[in-house]
Amino acid sequence: MMIRAKVLPFLFCLVVVAFGTKESDLKQCKHQCKVLQQIKEYQREKCYETCEKLYHGEKHEKEEEINSYEGREEGENNPYVFNEEHFITGIETEHGRIRVLLKFSERSKLLKGIENYRFAILEANPKTFVVPNHWDADAVLFVAQGRGTLSLVRKGKRNSFNIGRGDVIKVCAGTTAYLINRDDNEKLVIAKLLRPVSTPGQFQHFFGPGGRQNPESFYSAFSSEILEAALNTRKDRLQRLFGQPREGVIIRASEEQIRVMSQHEQGGIWPFGGESKGSVNIYKQRPLQSNQYGQFYQVDDSNYKQLEDLDISLNFANITEGGMLGPIYSSRATKIAVVVQGEGYFEMACPHLASESESGRHQGSKERETRIGLSYQKVRSKLKRGMVLVIPAGHPFVAVASTNQNLQIVGFNVNARNNEIVPLAGRNNVMSQLEREALELGFGLPAREVEQIFRSQPEEFFFQGPGGRQSGRAAA
């Protein structure tokens, strides 16, 4: 009993000694175990074990606390960032591919608000042809790279027009579409936001031209007697038409075929009602914001009427090297953005992830109830070409370009009607509009001091980033 009485107080001391995460704390704890007299060997081993548990347990808690402060970096735990591995290659040939991003709500329940939208990227090599097809989804297309000719068939009319980098095009569900890459060297890259109209969150390509496979024609799903009657053609000729294997959805076209299908005006005329053009170029719009650190362009239903019934807008941000956009937030719209050029990083304030973190720490407690919604977790990720990020409505965020190249991001904004972009820094930021009394009560400091901070930035919307240069390159 004498030995036990001495060991127990010492173990209590271990708690104090090991209440840290340094290696020296662990060594000191084990040294105390080693020099302890009048205990048996199994008790000494138990003492060592207690040191290890206390050290590693406290270290893990400290790491969680640090991670909570630093925020969600890129990877499995960041539901707002999508990398190459989050895409599924739906169609692929030696001449190109179509990649589809996984369903947003499958990544996180926090993205259920946009679960009926899908995002895809088409890549077609030079001098190639994408076989005619239609989708059971409305789509908004953005030409991120290259130049081509797009043909749309709807309401008994065909509209063909040349497209190039920066063009925005709406394609209605059920419209038969096909295109060519008319460039000799450059790949054609098109980003697509789709809103399925048949099965929520799912869409399909339907190919009329095709054969027995690759792609299979939807005509081949019908019985031969139906096709003979519908097309007024003998069975043997139908078998020849639909029974041949094909080379794929994206195939090589000859110079002459490319030349003939490219003889159209840029943009074209929209023949399906109204006088507006088939496409609009976002780079040719007057920038909403522009200075030496970046330019911000937008296309919405005011300059492209086809977007009116979709409640979608697009914007393009060119952040010059070393510059940054924001912090800002959107009042209503959720932004689905893709990096089309350059590198950098972004940060976002998220109350939802902070709530999850608090739930884990204080589950079932009153403290959890009072803290949820009153803290924010920093979501942070590096950005590079091809990455997709989601910025929910109301979430303040900032994007920063690297110091050696511009960062270019195109955003598809869902719920765009009556959306307002709210600046949180720079001229006309929202805090500078508050009454002095509101500033004093909100920040707990004299209004003059708060005003000095929020009025010290002379620029608007785009600023010099952390470690950025004094000036950058103009928009491409």
Image (cartoon, helix red, strand yellow):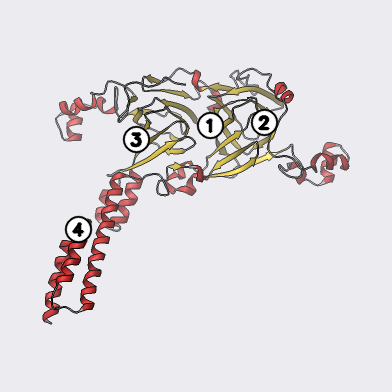
Separation of marks 2 and 3 at Cα, in angstroms: 42 Å
Whichever of labels 3 and 1 marks the residue nearer the N terminus, that label is 1
The residue identified by callout 3 is 396
Vertical side of 312 occupied by 353: above or below: below
Vertical side of 439 occupied by 58: above or below: below
The structure residue drawn at horizontal position 88% and vertical position 40%, both measured from the top left corner, is: 234
Please tell me the numbered disc located at residue 310. 1
Whichever of labels 2 and 3 marks the residue nearer the N terminus, that label is 2
Circle 2: residue type: Thr
Q: Residue 345: x and y, percent?
A: 38, 36
Vertical side of 3 occupied by 47: above or below: above
Whichever of labels 4 and 3 marks the residue nearer the N terminus, that label is 4
Circle 1: residue type: Leu
Whichever of labels 4 and 1 marks the residue nearer the N terminus, that label is 4
Separation of marks 3 and 1 at Cα, in angstroms: 25 Å
Vertical side of 35 occupied by 357: above or below: above
Proximity of marks 4 and 1: CB atoms separated by less than 8 Å: no
Element type where label 2 sits in the image = strand
Element type where label 3 sits in the image = loop
